[in-house]
Image: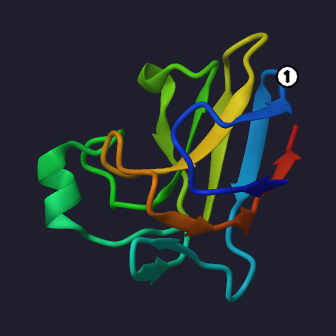
Amino acid sequence: MKSRPVSFGRQTGYKPIPARHTISGCEPGQKWRDWFISTTPDGFYNIIASLAGLRVPHVKCFCLCGGFNEDVATAFAIGSSKIFDITVPDGELSFFPNDAKGAYKNNKGSITINIKRLQ
Protein backbone atom coordinates (compact mmCIF):
# COMPACT_ATOMS: atom_id res chain seq x y z
CA MET A 1 0.00 0.00 0.00
CA LYS A 2 1.11 3.59 -0.52
CA SER A 3 1.30 6.20 2.21
CA ARG A 4 1.27 9.88 1.35
CA PRO A 5 2.75 12.36 3.83
CA VAL A 6 -0.52 13.62 5.28
CA SER A 7 -1.87 14.08 8.78
CA PHE A 8 -2.54 11.24 11.18
CA GLY A 9 -5.69 9.39 10.37
CA ARG A 10 -4.95 8.45 6.77
CA GLN A 11 -7.14 5.39 6.75
CA THR A 12 -5.78 2.35 4.98
CA GLY A 13 -8.68 -0.04 5.36
CA TYR A 14 -6.14 -2.54 6.69
CA LYS A 15 -7.41 -4.24 9.85
CA PRO A 16 -4.75 -6.73 10.91
CA ILE A 17 -5.55 -9.58 13.26
CA PRO A 18 -3.56 -9.79 16.49
CA ALA A 19 -0.24 -11.43 15.59
CA ARG A 20 3.42 -10.60 14.98
CA HIS A 21 3.88 -8.46 11.86
CA THR A 22 6.71 -6.86 9.97
CA ILE A 23 6.30 -3.51 8.26
CA SER A 24 8.77 -2.44 5.63
CA GLY A 25 8.54 1.10 4.34
CA CYS A 26 11.75 1.48 2.48
CA GLU A 27 12.20 0.06 -0.95
CA PRO A 28 15.60 1.33 -2.14
CA GLY A 29 15.50 4.94 -3.28
CA GLN A 30 12.07 5.78 -1.83
CA LYS A 31 11.81 9.28 -0.43
CA TRP A 32 9.15 11.79 0.49
CA ARG A 33 9.57 15.50 1.14
CA ASP A 34 8.91 17.86 4.02
CA TRP A 35 8.90 21.36 2.52
CA PHE A 36 12.30 21.31 0.74
CA ILE A 37 13.95 18.43 2.63
CA SER A 38 13.86 15.04 0.88
CA THR A 39 14.18 12.10 3.27
CA THR A 40 13.74 8.35 3.62
CA PRO A 41 11.14 6.79 5.95
CA ASP A 42 13.79 6.96 8.71
CA GLY A 43 13.26 10.74 8.90
CA PHE A 44 15.66 13.50 9.92
CA TYR A 45 16.41 15.69 12.93
CA ASN A 46 14.46 18.96 12.77
CA ILE A 47 14.80 21.13 15.87
CA ILE A 48 12.09 23.55 14.70
CA ALA A 49 9.51 20.77 14.25
CA SER A 50 10.56 19.28 17.60
CA LEU A 51 10.02 22.59 19.37
CA ALA A 52 6.68 23.06 17.58
CA GLY A 53 5.55 19.64 18.82
CA LEU A 54 5.91 16.48 16.75
CA ARG A 55 2.99 14.04 16.73
CA VAL A 56 5.21 11.32 18.21
CA PRO A 57 7.62 12.98 20.67
CA HIS A 58 11.28 11.92 20.68
CA VAL A 59 11.00 10.42 17.17
CA LYS A 60 12.69 12.02 14.14
CA CYS A 61 10.73 14.37 11.93
CA PHE A 62 9.24 12.58 8.91
CA CYS A 63 9.97 9.14 10.35
CA LEU A 64 7.31 6.75 9.07
CA CYS A 65 4.90 6.09 11.96
CA GLY A 66 1.79 4.03 12.45
CA GLY A 67 -1.17 3.92 14.79
CA PHE A 68 -4.57 2.35 15.31
CA ASN A 69 -8.08 3.75 15.01
CA GLU A 70 -6.88 7.33 14.42
CA ASP A 71 -5.74 7.47 18.07
CA VAL A 72 -2.41 9.27 18.54
CA ALA A 73 -2.01 7.47 21.88
CA THR A 74 -1.37 4.26 19.90
CA ALA A 75 1.24 5.85 17.60
CA PHE A 76 4.61 4.15 17.14
CA ALA A 77 7.75 4.72 15.06
CA ILE A 78 8.44 2.41 12.11
CA GLY A 79 11.18 4.04 10.03
CA SER A 80 12.46 1.82 7.21
CA SER A 81 11.17 -1.35 8.88
CA LYS A 82 9.84 -2.72 12.14
CA ILE A 83 8.75 -6.05 13.57
CA PHE A 84 6.00 -5.70 16.14
CA ASP A 85 3.12 -7.49 17.81
CA ILE A 86 -0.38 -6.26 17.07
CA THR A 87 -2.53 -6.62 20.15
CA VAL A 88 -5.37 -4.22 19.30
CA PRO A 89 -8.43 -6.22 18.24
CA ASP A 90 -10.61 -4.73 15.51
CA GLY A 91 -8.19 -1.88 14.89
CA GLU A 92 -7.55 -0.11 11.61
CA LEU A 93 -3.88 0.59 10.98
CA SER A 94 -2.94 4.04 9.68
CA PHE A 95 0.42 5.45 8.58
CA PHE A 96 1.84 8.98 8.64
CA PRO A 97 5.12 10.87 8.67
CA ASN A 98 5.98 12.29 12.07
CA ASP A 99 5.61 16.02 11.52
CA ALA A 100 4.64 19.03 13.61
CA LYS A 101 0.93 19.20 14.31
CA GLY A 102 -0.80 21.16 11.55
CA ALA A 103 2.32 21.27 9.34
CA TYR A 104 1.26 18.75 6.70
CA LYS A 105 0.34 21.19 3.92
CA ASN A 106 3.91 21.43 2.57
CA ASN A 107 4.49 17.67 2.37
CA LYS A 108 4.98 15.89 -0.96
CA GLY A 109 5.53 12.40 -2.34
CA SER A 110 4.62 8.92 -1.18
CA ILE A 111 6.27 5.68 -0.16
CA THR A 112 5.19 2.07 -0.60
CA ILE A 113 4.64 0.15 2.62
CA ASN A 114 4.73 -3.63 2.82
CA ILE A 115 3.02 -5.47 5.68
CA LYS A 116 3.48 -9.16 6.37
CA ARG A 117 2.04 -11.33 9.13
CA LEU A 118 4.81 -13.52 10.58
CA GLN A 119 2.74 -15.89 12.71
Label 1 SS:
loop
Colour approach in the figure: rainbow
What amino acid does circle 1 point to? Ile
The picture quadrant where one finds residue 12 is top right
Can you give x and y, in whole percent of width and height, for residue 49 in the image?
22, 56
Q: How many marks?
A: 1
Can you give x and y, in whole percent of width and height, for residue 20 in the image?
75, 36
For image coordinates 49% across by 24% down, the residue present is: 74
Q: Measured along the vertical axis of the image, is residue 99 above or below residue 31?
A: above
Name the image quarter holding the C terminus: top right
Q: Which residue is mark 1?
A: 17
Q: Measured along the vertical axis of the image, is residue 19 above or below residue 102?
A: above
Q: Nearer the viewer, residue 52 or 79?
A: 52
Residue extending farthest to the front is: 105
Q: Nearer the viewer, residue 45 or 48?
A: 48
For image coordinates 58% across by 22% down, the residue present is: 70
Q: Residues within 10 Å of mark 1 (few under 14, many from 20)?
A: some
Can you give x and y, in whole percent of width and height, for residue 55 in the image?
35, 39
Q: Nearer the viewer, residue 9 or 74?
A: 9
Residue extending farthest to the top is: 89
Q: Measured along the vertical axis of the image, is residue 42 above or below residue 65?
A: below
Q: Measured along the vertical axis of the image, is residue 55 above or below residue 104?
A: above
Is residue 99 toward the left or the right of residue 116 in the image?
Answer: left
Is residue 71 toward the left or the right of residue 69 in the image?
Answer: left
For image coordinates 67% across by 19% down, the residue present is: 87
Is residue 24 toward the left or the right of residue 116 in the image?
Answer: left
For image coordinates 36% across by 50% down, the residue present is: 103
